[in-house]
């Protein structure tokens, strides 16, 4: 703001004030005009300032002195105040757009309602990303649910098939408060609900529980473990001797596929692309180097320099939608689009239980925030890393979306346990399974 | 080269088959016999030969029978240089047998039923082409100019059928090295369809004049793409560039559960195709001398052995500038056309978009 602009603004504000308060017209002069906006600026930031006690002296000073010394010192104060107001505005704007991305709130150790301790434990693991990845979270959730069901007793005058679900809902909402539910968990829980509501009322409680354990175990076995094995066998055939396989971040399925292909005698090399803040690719890299697979490790910005050497891109998925869009770790879309641009086939390995009905068009409507990690360490490290960590600055908004959406146009094929399916035909997965998900 | 290897493999396979198959029944021979019929395409021949295998098989259980069928299919695949078409047929038949309801009194009764069903299917399958021809007719306007590639039974039938109702003229590619385009030319001109043979390299030249492209197929794969005689892919690319519709005709038994990611991901691809010959020093010197003699100011270093197409005609010296069989062996028979280049696939199950094909395939093999 130039001085003239500020002047103009103040004139307007003063006129408005004059309409309200009759005292306006008498006040004139530079010192006073500087003063007036502080009185008129809307409440939010001002009360704090006035409570510090420097408001009233200034005011009296303003009224009394019209000298040259006053305006300069006051104008600097003024500009600071307006800058702070803008910052506050900016931050709220940033939050306004992404506020729906689940923010990392500290998980309450105090749980609302009748939450099983194992669930509290699991919630903490989820919140701290100790357990992450769609498969791992789904398996962990289902195994903990088995314990919950074990420790559950049907209250008198109620039946297991009707009451257990209300008990589980409490556990589920606790887990969701720790970290938003993944599509895989959603699908598994829906299946579990179906099984619970279908269990026979006349069955003794322990028998009904045993049946549920069996159902849960079967789900984990059929939809995740066996599915992964089938995917491994199918995807392995797409890797030939001398290929350069590129993968992004870490997917448990991709890891298994490549290790299995290597063990099967195919000789290829792997490029692991990774990115901040989570650097998950490091774990994948250690698995590969342990198996003595020739590897390269690079960060996302270096992708362009290697993409032309790549023969196939193999990535995992968080979920897959009926329009063929793949929701996966942030950065996957970039890799896929780059590969598409260079006519490199992009193959997504994804179990069918990650299928989500509904169409996803962008990654803004629903997403999560990644744990912030250490995004500001820079090279060379001539300053201590702690001095580089910037936090809680009002004008700083750190945004690390956890996922992004790869459009179906940049995907060549999706390897599922039901076969290799082009992304256009993903909607036929329920058909391929011969039932509804 | 590869044929020799696969033959020796097949012999070892036959000896395995002797255990499961009662008499010395050669599934490959049955396949060749079936193929002798002009109307029978590889997938159908495969189904027929496998039905015969079921008749001859002494398998007492379903497991043994499926095992024998798989072995038979494997033998066929090893002995045929281009196994894509017949694999589609084998897949279909074995899938059918696996899911066949066990309602018969005895297993031999069940086998007879399977054989009967297999024969009925192939009998009806021959009429699929007439159905496709009828479907295609709806897309052919009067006075259309059509470009087709090589020779395909179903395309020929569709064109002959269209000729009875509409005026059409056809460009057909020569389709080297087998020159099957001339066969199409002979058939079409015999009934009076205006037809011109164009060079494979003239497809881009002729594309502007045609209304649409009509090709047959060896197999339609799960991506919705197409495997067909080499040259189809470039035709599709050119058609796409000129915004001309590219239609593929395929009987539903050619739908194949395969997902090639690239040309080199096809089962027919081997390390010999597109390979560079090893430079043989004394021989290459000789060649270089010839090339230096015949072409002026040609730097010997640039005339490397890699340019087989270039140096070979020079060595044979003008008279007939054709590729040697050794050079031909480094070339593919079939190529893969991506689904985004294909406008529609006409089949006996209806007119499908490439996405529709993949959905049909996913549904067809559900539960296998």
Image (cartoon, rainbow, N blue to C red):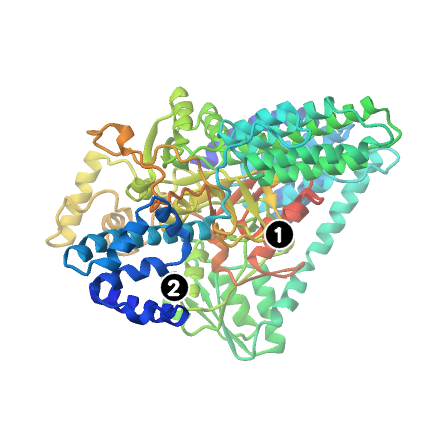
Residue sitting at x 40%, y 70%: B206
Q: Position of residue A221 (x, y in %)?
A: 65, 28
Q: For the C terminus of chain B, which image quadrant?
A: top right
Label 1: state its secondary structure. Answer: helix
- Asked whether residue B106 appears in the rendered view, the answer is yes
Q: Residues within 10 Å of mark 2 (few under 14, many from 20)?
A: some
In the image, is A88 to the left or to the right of B130? left
Say whether residue A220 is left or right of residue A410: right
Quarter of the figure with residue B131:
bottom right
Question: In the current view of this chain or complex, which residue is farthest to the top?
Answer: A290
Horizontally, residue B159 falls left or right of residue A87, namely right
* Disc number lying in front (2 or 1): 1
Between B338 and B191, the residue placed more toward the observer is B338
Mark 2 vs 1, N-terminal side: 2
The residue wearing badge 1 is B359
Q: Position of residue A250 (x, y in %)?
A: 44, 32
A207 is higher (above) or lower (below) than A352? above
Q: Tell me the quadrant of the picture where the N terminus of chain B can be found.
A: top left
Q: Secondary structure at mark 2?
A: loop
The 10 Å Cα crowd at callout 1, few under 14, some 14 to 19, many 20 or more, is many
Residue A36: quarter of image: bottom left
Disc 2 vs disc 1: Cβ atoms closer than 8 Å? no
């Amino acid at each position: 703001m130039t001085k003239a602009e500020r002047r103009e603004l103040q004139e307007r504000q003063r006129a408005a004030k004059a309409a309200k308060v009759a005292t306006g017209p008498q006040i004139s002069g530079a010192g006073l005009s500087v003063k007036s906006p502080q009185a008129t600026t809307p409440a939010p930031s001002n009360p704090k300032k006035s409570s510090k006690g420097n408001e009233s002296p200034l005011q009296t000073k303003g009224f009394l002195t019209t000298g040259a010394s006053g305006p300069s010192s006051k104008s600097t104060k003024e500009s600071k105040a307006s800058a702070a107001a803008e910052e506050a505005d900016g931050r709220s704007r940033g939050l306004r757009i992404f506020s729906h991305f689940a923010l990392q709130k500290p998980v309450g150790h105090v749980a609302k309602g009748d939450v099983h301790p194992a669930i509290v434990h699991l919630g903490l693991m989820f919140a701290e990303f100790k357990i992450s990845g769609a498969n791992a979270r789904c398996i962990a959730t289902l195994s903990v649910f088995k314990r919950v069901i074990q420790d559950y007793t049907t209250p008198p005058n109620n039946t297991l098939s009707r009451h257990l679900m209300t008990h589980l809902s409490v556990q589920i909402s606790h887990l969701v408060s720790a970290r938003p539910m993944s599509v895989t968990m959603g699908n598994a829980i829906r299946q579990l609900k179906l099984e619970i509501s279908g269990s026979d009322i006349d069955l003794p409680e322990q028998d009904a529980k045993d049946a549920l354990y069996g159902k849960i175990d079967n789900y984990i076995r059929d939809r995740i473990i066996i599915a992964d094995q089938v995917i491994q066998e199918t995807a392995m055939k797409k890797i030939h001797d001398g290929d350069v396989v590129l993968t992004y971040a870490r997917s448990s399925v991709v890891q298994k596929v490549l290790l299995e292909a290597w063990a099967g005698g195919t000789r290829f090399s792997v490029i692991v692309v990774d990115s901040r803040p989570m650097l998950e690719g490091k774990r994948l890299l250690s698995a590969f180097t342990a198996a003595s697979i020739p590897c390269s490790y690079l960060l996302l910005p270096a992708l362009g320099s290697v993409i032309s050497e790549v023969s196939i891109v193999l990535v995992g998925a968080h979920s897959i939608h009926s329009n063929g869009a793949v929701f996966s770790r942030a950065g996957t879309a970039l890799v896929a689009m780059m590969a598409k641009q260079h006519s490199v086939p992009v193959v997504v390995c994804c179990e069918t239980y990650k299928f989500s009905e509904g169409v996803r068009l962008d990654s803004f409507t629903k997403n999560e925030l990644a744990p912030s990690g250490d995004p500001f360490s820079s090279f060379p490290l001539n300053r201590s890393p702690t001095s580089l960590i910037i936090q809680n600055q009002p004008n700083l908004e750190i945004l690390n979306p956890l996922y992004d959406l790869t459009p179906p146009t940049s995907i060549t094929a999706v390897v599922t346990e039901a076969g290799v399916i082009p992304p256009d035909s993903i909607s036929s997965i329920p058909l391929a399974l011969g039932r509804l998900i | 080269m590869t044929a020799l290897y696969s033959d020796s493999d097949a012999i070892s396979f036959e000896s395995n088959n002797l255990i499961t198959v009662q008499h010395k029944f050669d599934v490959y021979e049955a396949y060749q016999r079936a193929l002798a019929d002009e109307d029978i395409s590889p997938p159908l021949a495969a189904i027929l030969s496998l039905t015969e295998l079921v008749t001859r098989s002494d398998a007492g259980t379903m497991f043994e029978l499926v095992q024998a069928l798989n072995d038979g299919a494997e033998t066929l695949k090893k002995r045929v240089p281009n196994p894509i078409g017949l694999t589609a047929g084998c897949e279909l038949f074995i899938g059918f047998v696996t899911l066949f309801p066990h309602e018969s009194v005895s297993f031999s009764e069940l086998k007879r039923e399977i054989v009967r069903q297999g024969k009925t299917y192939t009998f009806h399958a021959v009429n699929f082409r007439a159905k496709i021809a009828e479907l295609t007719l709806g897309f052919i306007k009067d006075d259309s100019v059509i470009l087709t590639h090589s020779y395909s039974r179903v395309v020929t039938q569709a064109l002959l059928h269209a000729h009875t109702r509409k005026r059409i003229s056809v460009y057909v590619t020569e389709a080297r090295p087998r020159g099957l385009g001339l066969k199409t030319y002979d058939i079409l001109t015999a009934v009076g369809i205006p037809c011109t043979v164009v060079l494979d390299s003239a497809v881009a030249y002729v594309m502007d004049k045609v209304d649409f492209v009509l090709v047959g197929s060896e197999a339609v794969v799960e991506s919705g793409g197409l495997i067909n005689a080499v040259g189809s892919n470039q035709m599709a690319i050119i058609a796409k560039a000129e915004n001309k519709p590219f239609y593929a005709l395929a009987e539903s038994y050619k739908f194949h559960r395969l997902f090639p990611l690239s040309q080199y991901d096809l089962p027919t691809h081997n390390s010999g195709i597109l390979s560079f010959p090893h430079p043989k020093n004394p021989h290459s010197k000789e060649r270089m001398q010839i090339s230096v003699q015949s072409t002026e100011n040609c730097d010997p270093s640039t005339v490397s052995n890699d340019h087989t197409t270039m140096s070979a005609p020079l060595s044979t010296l003008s008279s007939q500038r054709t590729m040697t069989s050794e050079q031909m062996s480094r070339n593919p028979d079939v190529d893969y056309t991506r689904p985004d280049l294909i406008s529609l696939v006409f089949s006996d199950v209806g007119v499908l978009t490439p996405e529709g094909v993949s959905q049909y395939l996913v549904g067809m093999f559900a539960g296998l």
